[in-house]
Image (cartoon, helix red, strand yellow):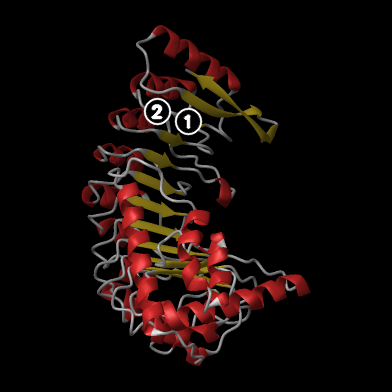
Amino acid sequence: METYKFETQWLEKLASTSQEFQAENASFYDGSRKEKVTTHNERMMKLSPLFASQPKFEKVCNDEKNKLVHSGFTSYLITVQSNHTSKDLNELHKLADDLKYIVNFWGHNLTELIIIGYTFSKILPTIKITCPNLKILNLAFEEIEIKDFENVFSNMSHLEELTIDWKCENLPLPTILVESIEQVGGTLKSLELANFAKTNDRRLPDSFVSVFPRLIVLEYLSLHGFGDLNQALIQSISEIKSLVSLSLVPVWVEDLECNMYPIGNLKNLERLNIRTDCGVTDEFLINLSNNAKNLKKLAIFATNITDKGIMALNKFTQLEILDLNSRLSQKNNEFITDQSVEYLISNQQLEMLDISNCIKITDSSVLKLVKNIKYLRDLYLKETSLTVELAKKLRDITDTTEIRETSLLVHVPIEKKNSDNDTSENAP
Protein backbone atom coordinates (compact mmCIF):
# COMPACT_ATOMS: atom_id res chain seq x y z
CA MET A 1 0.00 0.00 0.00
CA GLU A 2 1.35 3.44 -0.94
CA THR A 3 2.02 5.93 1.85
CA TYR A 4 1.91 9.71 1.79
CA LYS A 5 3.53 12.13 4.24
CA PHE A 6 1.35 14.81 5.79
CA GLU A 7 2.28 16.96 8.76
CA THR A 8 0.02 16.66 11.80
CA GLN A 9 -0.71 20.39 11.74
CA TRP A 10 -1.73 20.17 8.06
CA LEU A 11 -4.13 17.28 8.75
CA GLU A 12 -5.61 19.09 11.75
CA LYS A 13 -6.26 22.16 9.60
CA LEU A 14 -7.95 20.02 6.93
CA ALA A 15 -10.06 18.28 9.58
CA SER A 16 -11.17 21.65 10.96
CA THR A 17 -12.07 22.95 7.49
CA SER A 18 -13.92 19.72 6.76
CA GLN A 19 -16.08 20.16 9.85
CA GLU A 20 -16.75 23.78 8.90
CA PHE A 21 -17.94 22.80 5.41
CA GLN A 22 -20.11 19.96 6.78
CA ALA A 23 -21.77 22.28 9.30
CA GLU A 24 -22.41 24.77 6.52
CA ASN A 25 -24.01 22.04 4.37
CA ALA A 26 -26.17 20.82 7.24
CA SER A 27 -27.50 24.27 8.07
CA PHE A 28 -28.25 24.91 4.40
CA TYR A 29 -30.22 21.69 3.91
CA ASP A 30 -32.19 21.93 7.16
CA GLY A 31 -33.36 25.42 6.21
CA SER A 32 -31.73 27.29 9.10
CA ARG A 33 -29.27 29.01 6.77
CA LYS A 34 -30.72 31.98 4.90
CA GLU A 35 -27.87 32.75 2.52
CA LYS A 36 -26.70 30.32 -0.13
CA VAL A 37 -24.00 27.76 0.58
CA THR A 38 -20.53 28.88 -0.53
CA THR A 39 -19.59 27.93 -4.08
CA HIS A 40 -16.84 25.53 -5.07
CA ASN A 41 -14.55 28.43 -6.04
CA GLU A 42 -15.14 30.16 -2.71
CA ARG A 43 -14.23 27.01 -0.84
CA MET A 44 -11.13 26.55 -2.97
CA MET A 45 -10.04 30.02 -1.92
CA LYS A 46 -10.48 29.09 1.74
CA LEU A 47 -8.44 25.93 1.17
CA SER A 48 -5.58 27.73 -0.60
CA PRO A 49 -3.21 27.72 2.43
CA LEU A 50 -3.32 23.91 2.36
CA PHE A 51 -2.36 23.70 -1.29
CA ALA A 52 1.16 25.15 -1.00
CA SER A 53 2.71 21.95 0.37
CA GLN A 54 0.34 19.52 -1.36
CA PRO A 55 -0.15 20.37 -5.06
CA LYS A 56 -1.68 16.94 -5.71
CA PHE A 57 -4.32 17.70 -3.09
CA GLU A 58 -5.14 20.92 -4.93
CA LYS A 59 -5.47 19.01 -8.20
CA VAL A 60 -7.94 16.53 -6.69
CA CYS A 61 -9.95 19.28 -4.96
CA ASN A 62 -10.13 21.27 -8.15
CA ASP A 63 -12.27 18.57 -9.79
CA GLU A 64 -15.76 19.62 -8.74
CA LYS A 65 -17.31 16.42 -10.14
CA ASN A 66 -15.75 14.18 -7.49
CA LYS A 67 -17.89 15.81 -4.72
CA LEU A 68 -14.94 15.92 -2.31
CA VAL A 69 -15.03 19.65 -1.54
CA HIS A 70 -18.78 19.97 -1.95
CA SER A 71 -19.43 17.25 0.64
CA GLY A 72 -17.02 18.69 3.17
CA PHE A 73 -14.53 15.88 2.46
CA THR A 74 -16.92 13.06 3.35
CA SER A 75 -17.72 11.81 -0.19
CA TYR A 76 -15.59 10.83 -3.16
CA LEU A 77 -16.92 9.97 -6.61
CA ILE A 78 -15.37 8.53 -9.79
CA THR A 79 -17.63 8.50 -12.85
CA VAL A 80 -15.38 8.05 -15.91
CA GLN A 81 -16.83 5.64 -18.48
CA SER A 82 -13.96 3.96 -20.28
CA ASN A 83 -14.34 2.58 -23.81
CA HIS A 84 -10.76 1.36 -23.75
CA THR A 85 -9.51 4.09 -26.10
CA SER A 86 -6.11 5.53 -25.27
CA LYS A 87 -7.68 8.81 -24.15
CA ASP A 88 -10.18 7.08 -21.88
CA LEU A 89 -7.55 4.79 -20.42
CA ASN A 90 -5.25 7.72 -19.68
CA GLU A 91 -8.09 9.48 -17.87
CA LEU A 92 -8.89 6.30 -16.00
CA HIS A 93 -5.27 5.91 -14.85
CA LYS A 94 -5.25 9.49 -13.58
CA LEU A 95 -8.48 9.02 -11.68
CA ALA A 96 -7.25 5.71 -10.27
CA ASP A 97 -4.13 7.47 -9.02
CA ASP A 98 -6.26 10.18 -7.41
CA LEU A 99 -8.49 7.53 -5.83
CA LYS A 100 -5.53 5.75 -4.24
CA TYR A 101 -4.17 9.07 -3.03
CA ILE A 102 -7.44 10.08 -1.33
CA VAL A 103 -8.28 6.75 0.30
CA ASN A 104 -4.74 6.35 1.63
CA PHE A 105 -4.50 9.60 3.57
CA TRP A 106 -8.17 10.56 4.04
CA GLY A 107 -10.12 7.32 3.73
CA HIS A 108 -10.80 7.15 7.46
CA ASN A 109 -12.96 10.28 7.14
CA LEU A 110 -14.96 9.20 4.09
CA THR A 111 -18.57 8.11 4.59
CA GLU A 112 -19.45 7.77 0.88
CA LEU A 113 -17.34 6.23 -1.88
CA ILE A 114 -18.78 5.82 -5.38
CA ILE A 115 -16.46 4.15 -7.89
CA ILE A 116 -18.31 3.79 -11.17
CA GLY A 117 -15.51 4.10 -13.72
CA TYR A 118 -12.76 2.14 -11.99
CA THR A 119 -13.67 -1.53 -12.48
CA PHE A 120 -10.67 -3.34 -11.00
CA SER A 121 -10.91 -5.27 -7.75
CA LYS A 122 -7.30 -4.58 -6.77
CA ILE A 123 -8.36 -1.38 -4.98
CA LEU A 124 -10.49 -3.35 -2.51
CA PRO A 125 -7.78 -4.35 0.02
CA THR A 126 -6.79 -0.69 0.33
CA ILE A 127 -10.39 0.45 0.84
CA LYS A 128 -10.87 -2.29 3.43
CA ILE A 129 -7.97 -0.96 5.52
CA THR A 130 -8.32 2.79 5.06
CA CYS A 131 -12.11 3.37 4.87
CA PRO A 132 -13.70 1.87 8.01
CA ASN A 133 -16.37 4.59 8.37
CA LEU A 134 -18.07 4.20 5.00
CA LYS A 135 -21.86 4.30 5.04
CA ILE A 136 -22.35 4.24 1.26
CA LEU A 137 -20.22 2.19 -1.15
CA ASN A 138 -20.83 1.84 -4.89
CA LEU A 139 -18.56 -0.50 -6.86
CA ALA A 140 -18.31 -1.88 -10.40
CA PHE A 141 -16.14 -4.79 -11.48
CA GLU A 142 -14.85 -5.90 -14.86
CA GLU A 143 -11.41 -7.31 -14.05
CA ILE A 144 -10.94 -9.08 -10.73
CA GLU A 145 -8.80 -11.27 -8.54
CA ILE A 146 -10.92 -13.51 -6.31
CA LYS A 147 -8.62 -12.99 -3.34
CA ASP A 148 -9.39 -9.25 -3.34
CA PHE A 149 -12.92 -9.99 -2.05
CA GLU A 150 -11.84 -11.92 1.04
CA ASN A 151 -13.41 -10.33 4.13
CA VAL A 152 -13.55 -7.10 2.15
CA PHE A 153 -16.34 -5.55 4.27
CA SER A 154 -15.18 -6.91 7.64
CA ASN A 155 -13.77 -3.53 8.72
CA MET A 156 -16.81 -1.49 7.64
CA SER A 157 -18.99 -1.57 10.74
CA HIS A 158 -21.07 1.44 9.60
CA LEU A 159 -21.90 0.33 6.03
CA GLU A 160 -25.59 0.96 5.21
CA GLU A 161 -25.77 1.07 1.40
CA LEU A 162 -23.91 -1.25 -0.98
CA THR A 163 -24.22 -1.27 -4.77
CA ILE A 164 -22.28 -3.67 -7.00
CA ASP A 165 -22.41 -3.61 -10.81
CA TRP A 166 -21.03 -6.89 -12.13
CA LYS A 167 -19.49 -6.66 -15.61
CA CYS A 168 -17.14 -9.64 -15.55
CA GLU A 169 -17.58 -11.78 -18.64
CA ASN A 170 -17.53 -15.57 -18.14
CA LEU A 171 -17.38 -15.22 -14.37
CA PRO A 172 -20.29 -15.32 -11.88
CA LEU A 173 -20.38 -13.48 -8.57
CA PRO A 174 -17.79 -15.24 -6.41
CA THR A 175 -18.97 -17.00 -3.26
CA ILE A 176 -16.27 -15.19 -1.29
CA LEU A 177 -17.98 -11.86 -2.12
CA VAL A 178 -21.33 -13.18 -0.86
CA GLU A 179 -19.71 -14.30 2.38
CA SER A 180 -18.20 -10.82 2.78
CA ILE A 181 -21.65 -9.20 2.42
CA GLU A 182 -22.83 -11.26 5.37
CA GLN A 183 -20.23 -9.49 7.53
CA VAL A 184 -22.24 -6.24 7.34
CA GLY A 185 -25.59 -7.93 7.93
CA GLY A 186 -26.15 -5.96 11.12
CA THR A 187 -25.89 -2.52 9.47
CA LEU A 188 -26.71 -2.95 5.76
CA LYS A 189 -30.01 -1.27 4.85
CA SER A 190 -29.71 -1.24 1.05
CA LEU A 191 -28.23 -3.86 -1.29
CA GLU A 192 -28.26 -3.50 -5.08
CA LEU A 193 -26.71 -6.17 -7.28
CA ALA A 194 -26.79 -5.76 -11.06
CA ASN A 195 -25.34 -8.07 -13.70
CA PHE A 196 -24.43 -6.20 -16.89
CA ALA A 197 -22.22 -8.83 -18.50
CA LYS A 198 -23.54 -10.58 -21.61
CA THR A 199 -21.76 -13.92 -21.65
CA ASN A 200 -21.18 -14.87 -18.03
CA ASP A 201 -22.92 -17.33 -15.76
CA ARG A 202 -25.87 -15.25 -14.56
CA ARG A 203 -26.81 -17.42 -11.62
CA LEU A 204 -26.73 -15.98 -8.14
CA PRO A 205 -24.44 -18.02 -5.88
CA ASP A 206 -26.32 -20.57 -3.80
CA SER A 207 -24.62 -19.14 -0.70
CA PHE A 208 -27.11 -16.25 -0.83
CA VAL A 209 -29.76 -18.69 0.43
CA SER A 210 -28.16 -18.60 3.88
CA VAL A 211 -26.92 -15.00 3.69
CA PHE A 212 -30.17 -13.16 2.83
CA PRO A 213 -31.96 -13.97 6.13
CA ARG A 214 -28.90 -12.73 8.03
CA LEU A 215 -29.22 -9.22 6.60
CA ILE A 216 -31.38 -8.37 9.58
CA VAL A 217 -31.89 -4.62 8.97
CA LEU A 218 -32.07 -4.68 5.17
CA GLU A 219 -34.85 -2.43 3.86
CA TYR A 220 -34.05 -2.21 0.14
CA LEU A 221 -33.05 -5.15 -2.08
CA SER A 222 -32.60 -4.99 -5.86
CA LEU A 223 -31.45 -7.93 -8.00
CA HIS A 224 -31.12 -7.02 -11.67
CA GLY A 225 -29.94 -9.16 -14.58
CA PHE A 226 -29.57 -12.51 -12.84
CA GLY A 227 -31.16 -15.58 -14.39
CA ASP A 228 -31.60 -18.13 -11.66
CA LEU A 229 -34.30 -17.09 -9.22
CA ASN A 230 -34.83 -20.60 -7.89
CA GLN A 231 -37.28 -21.46 -5.13
CA ALA A 232 -34.63 -21.60 -2.43
CA LEU A 233 -33.55 -18.03 -3.22
CA ILE A 234 -37.15 -16.78 -3.26
CA GLN A 235 -37.76 -18.42 0.11
CA SER A 236 -34.61 -16.89 1.61
CA ILE A 237 -35.60 -13.39 0.38
CA SER A 238 -39.01 -13.83 2.00
CA GLU A 239 -37.24 -14.27 5.34
CA ILE A 240 -35.76 -10.73 5.27
CA LYS A 241 -38.49 -9.40 7.54
CA SER A 242 -37.26 -5.79 7.48
CA LEU A 243 -37.67 -5.36 3.69
CA VAL A 244 -39.54 -2.23 2.65
CA SER A 245 -38.61 -2.26 -1.05
CA LEU A 246 -37.91 -5.28 -3.27
CA SER A 247 -37.05 -5.30 -6.98
CA LEU A 248 -36.50 -8.56 -8.89
CA VAL A 249 -35.59 -8.04 -12.55
CA PRO A 250 -34.11 -11.30 -13.86
CA VAL A 251 -32.94 -11.89 -17.41
CA TRP A 252 -35.74 -13.43 -19.42
CA VAL A 253 -35.59 -17.20 -19.08
CA GLU A 254 -38.42 -19.19 -20.64
CA ASP A 255 -38.03 -22.25 -18.41
CA LEU A 256 -37.60 -20.34 -15.14
CA GLU A 257 -39.49 -22.17 -12.42
CA CYS A 258 -40.31 -20.66 -9.06
CA ASN A 259 -43.27 -19.59 -6.99
CA MET A 260 -43.41 -16.01 -5.73
CA TYR A 261 -45.96 -16.86 -3.05
CA PRO A 262 -43.45 -16.58 -0.13
CA ILE A 263 -42.69 -12.96 -1.10
CA GLY A 264 -46.25 -12.17 -0.07
CA ASN A 265 -45.31 -12.94 3.54
CA LEU A 266 -43.28 -9.72 3.81
CA LYS A 267 -45.42 -7.49 6.04
CA ASN A 268 -43.32 -4.29 5.80
CA LEU A 269 -43.21 -4.02 2.02
CA GLU A 270 -44.10 -0.62 0.58
CA ARG A 271 -42.66 -1.08 -2.94
CA LEU A 272 -42.55 -4.31 -4.97
CA ASN A 273 -41.28 -4.74 -8.52
CA ILE A 274 -41.21 -8.23 -10.08
CA ARG A 275 -40.32 -8.32 -13.78
CA THR A 276 -41.05 -11.93 -14.60
CA ASP A 277 -44.36 -13.75 -14.88
CA CYS A 278 -42.88 -16.84 -13.28
CA GLY A 279 -44.79 -17.64 -10.12
CA VAL A 280 -46.81 -14.40 -10.19
CA THR A 281 -50.25 -15.86 -9.57
CA ASP A 282 -53.60 -14.99 -8.00
CA GLU A 283 -52.55 -16.86 -4.88
CA PHE A 284 -49.43 -14.74 -4.65
CA LEU A 285 -51.44 -11.50 -4.85
CA ILE A 286 -53.96 -12.72 -2.28
CA ASN A 287 -51.16 -13.61 0.14
CA LEU A 288 -49.50 -10.24 -0.49
CA SER A 289 -52.73 -8.34 0.12
CA ASN A 290 -53.25 -10.15 3.43
CA ASN A 291 -49.82 -9.16 4.72
CA ALA A 292 -48.30 -6.05 3.07
CA LYS A 293 -50.89 -3.58 4.34
CA ASN A 294 -48.65 -0.55 3.66
CA LEU A 295 -47.92 -1.32 0.00
CA LYS A 296 -47.73 1.87 -2.09
CA LYS A 297 -46.20 0.62 -5.35
CA LEU A 298 -46.81 -2.70 -7.09
CA ALA A 299 -45.30 -3.51 -10.49
CA ILE A 300 -45.69 -7.04 -11.83
CA PHE A 301 -46.07 -8.99 -15.06
CA ALA A 302 -49.75 -9.88 -14.89
CA THR A 303 -49.79 -12.46 -17.69
CA ASN A 304 -51.33 -15.16 -15.49
CA ILE A 305 -53.44 -12.98 -13.17
CA THR A 306 -57.23 -13.32 -13.23
CA ASP A 307 -60.09 -11.28 -11.77
CA LYS A 308 -59.61 -13.17 -8.50
CA GLY A 309 -56.13 -11.71 -8.03
CA ILE A 310 -57.12 -8.16 -9.02
CA MET A 311 -60.05 -8.15 -6.60
CA ALA A 312 -57.64 -8.86 -3.75
CA LEU A 313 -55.88 -5.57 -4.45
CA ASN A 314 -58.69 -3.53 -2.92
CA LYS A 315 -57.13 -4.29 0.46
CA PHE A 316 -54.21 -1.98 -0.42
CA THR A 317 -55.67 1.26 0.91
CA GLN A 318 -52.40 3.18 0.39
CA LEU A 319 -51.62 1.94 -3.14
CA GLU A 320 -50.38 4.80 -5.34
CA ILE A 321 -48.86 2.96 -8.32
CA LEU A 322 -50.21 -0.22 -9.93
CA ASP A 323 -48.33 -1.48 -12.98
CA LEU A 324 -49.70 -4.68 -14.56
CA ASN A 325 -47.75 -4.17 -17.78
CA SER A 326 -46.78 -7.41 -19.54
CA ARG A 327 -45.12 -5.76 -22.55
CA LEU A 328 -41.65 -7.09 -21.86
CA SER A 329 -42.92 -10.67 -21.72
CA GLN A 330 -44.60 -10.11 -25.12
CA LYS A 331 -47.74 -11.78 -23.80
CA ASN A 332 -51.25 -10.47 -23.31
CA ASN A 333 -53.43 -10.96 -20.28
CA GLU A 334 -56.61 -12.71 -21.35
CA PHE A 335 -58.16 -13.14 -17.89
CA ILE A 336 -58.61 -9.68 -16.34
CA THR A 337 -62.03 -8.25 -17.15
CA ASP A 338 -64.14 -5.20 -16.35
CA GLN A 339 -65.52 -6.97 -13.30
CA SER A 340 -62.24 -6.83 -11.37
CA VAL A 341 -61.00 -3.52 -12.80
CA GLU A 342 -64.04 -1.81 -11.28
CA TYR A 343 -62.93 -3.13 -7.90
CA LEU A 344 -59.89 -0.84 -8.16
CA ILE A 345 -62.19 2.11 -7.45
CA SER A 346 -61.66 1.36 -3.76
CA ASN A 347 -57.96 2.23 -4.21
CA GLN A 348 -58.60 5.95 -3.84
CA GLN A 349 -54.91 6.86 -3.54
CA LEU A 350 -54.02 5.54 -7.00
CA GLU A 351 -51.91 8.00 -9.00
CA MET A 352 -50.65 5.74 -11.78
CA LEU A 353 -52.34 2.71 -13.34
CA ASP A 354 -50.92 0.63 -16.19
CA ILE A 355 -53.29 -2.02 -17.56
CA SER A 356 -51.59 -2.32 -20.94
CA ASN A 357 -51.91 -5.72 -22.64
CA CYS A 358 -55.09 -6.52 -20.69
CA ILE A 359 -57.10 -7.22 -23.83
CA LYS A 360 -60.45 -8.08 -22.22
CA ILE A 361 -60.96 -4.67 -20.61
CA THR A 362 -63.53 -2.36 -22.22
CA ASP A 363 -64.31 1.35 -22.10
CA SER A 364 -66.95 0.83 -19.43
CA SER A 365 -64.68 -0.05 -16.50
CA VAL A 366 -62.02 2.49 -17.44
CA LEU A 367 -64.58 5.29 -17.53
CA LYS A 368 -65.79 4.35 -14.05
CA LEU A 369 -62.22 4.35 -12.71
CA VAL A 370 -61.46 7.82 -14.00
CA LYS A 371 -64.75 9.17 -12.72
CA ASN A 372 -64.19 7.86 -9.21
CA ILE A 373 -60.41 8.01 -8.59
CA LYS A 374 -59.66 11.72 -8.36
CA TYR A 375 -55.89 11.51 -7.84
CA LEU A 376 -55.21 9.38 -10.93
CA ARG A 377 -52.72 11.27 -13.10
CA ASP A 378 -51.31 8.59 -15.47
CA LEU A 379 -53.35 5.88 -17.15
CA TYR A 380 -51.65 3.45 -19.58
CA LEU A 381 -53.88 1.58 -22.01
CA LYS A 382 -51.37 0.48 -24.65
CA GLU A 383 -51.87 -2.81 -26.48
CA THR A 384 -55.53 -3.05 -25.47
CA SER A 385 -58.80 -2.89 -27.37
CA LEU A 386 -59.22 0.66 -26.07
CA THR A 387 -58.69 3.55 -28.47
CA VAL A 388 -57.96 7.24 -28.74
CA GLU A 389 -61.74 7.78 -28.69
CA LEU A 390 -61.75 6.63 -25.08
CA ALA A 391 -59.42 9.48 -24.11
CA LYS A 392 -61.91 11.92 -25.62
CA LYS A 393 -64.70 10.39 -23.54
CA LEU A 394 -62.51 10.69 -20.46
CA ARG A 395 -62.06 14.38 -21.18
CA ASP A 396 -65.81 14.85 -21.44
CA ILE A 397 -66.32 13.09 -18.10
CA THR A 398 -63.81 15.28 -16.28
CA ASP A 399 -65.36 18.38 -17.83
CA THR A 400 -68.86 17.53 -16.64
CA THR A 401 -68.08 16.23 -13.14
CA GLU A 402 -66.52 17.90 -10.14
CA ILE A 403 -62.97 19.16 -10.54
CA ARG A 404 -60.29 16.47 -10.28
CA GLU A 405 -57.45 16.80 -7.80
CA THR A 406 -54.91 16.33 -10.62
CA SER A 407 -54.84 16.43 -14.42
CA LEU A 408 -55.02 13.06 -16.15
CA LEU A 409 -52.64 11.85 -18.87
CA VAL A 410 -54.01 8.90 -20.83
CA HIS A 411 -51.60 6.79 -22.89
CA VAL A 412 -53.29 4.88 -25.72
CA PRO A 413 -52.13 3.49 -29.10
CA ILE A 414 -52.69 5.65 -32.16
CA GLU A 415 -53.72 2.70 -34.27
CA LYS A 416 -54.22 -0.89 -33.29
CA LYS A 417 -52.60 -2.06 -36.52
CA ASN A 418 -49.47 -0.11 -35.68
CA SER A 419 -49.21 -0.62 -31.96
CA ASP A 420 -45.61 0.55 -31.72
CA ASN A 421 -46.91 4.09 -32.09
CA ASP A 422 -48.78 5.70 -29.25
CA THR A 423 -50.18 9.00 -28.20
CA SER A 424 -51.34 10.61 -25.00
CA GLU A 425 -54.51 12.55 -24.45
CA ASN A 426 -54.55 15.04 -21.61
CA ALA A 427 -57.83 15.06 -19.71
CA PRO A 428 -57.51 18.06 -17.36
From the image, tell me which residue sits under label 1. Answer: 379
Residue at mark 1 to residue at mark 2: CA–CA distance: 7 Å
Amino acid type shown at disc 2: Leu
Rendered location of residue 415, percent (x, y): 67, 27
Observer-nearest of 389 and 319 = 319
Q: Is residue 49 above or below residue 70?
A: below
Q: Is residue 200 left or right of residue 22?
A: right
Observer-nearest of 418 and 218 = 218
Q: Is residue 151 left or right of residue 61?
A: left
Residue 193 in view: no
Q: Is residue 63 above or below residue 167?
A: above
Residue 308 found in image quarter: top left
Q: Is residue 135 left or right of residue 384?
A: left
Structural crowding at the residue carrying mark 2, measured as other residues with C-alpha within 10 Å and reported as few (<14), some (14–19) or many (≥20): many
Residue located at (50% from left, 75% from top): 203
Structural crowding at the residue carrying mark 1, measured as other residues with C-alpha within 10 Å and reported as few (<14), some (14–19) or many (≥20): many
Q: Secondary structure at mark 2?
A: loop
Residue located at (65% from left, 66% from top): 81
Rendered location of residue 266, percent (x, y): 26, 58
Q: Is residue 333 above or below residue 117?
A: above
From the image, tell me which residue sits under label 2. Answer: 376
Whether tag 1 and tag 2 are in contact, CB under 8 A, the answer is yes
Residue 70 found in image quarter: bottom left
Observer-nearest of 145 and 38 = 38
Rendered location of residue 298, percent (x, y): 38, 46
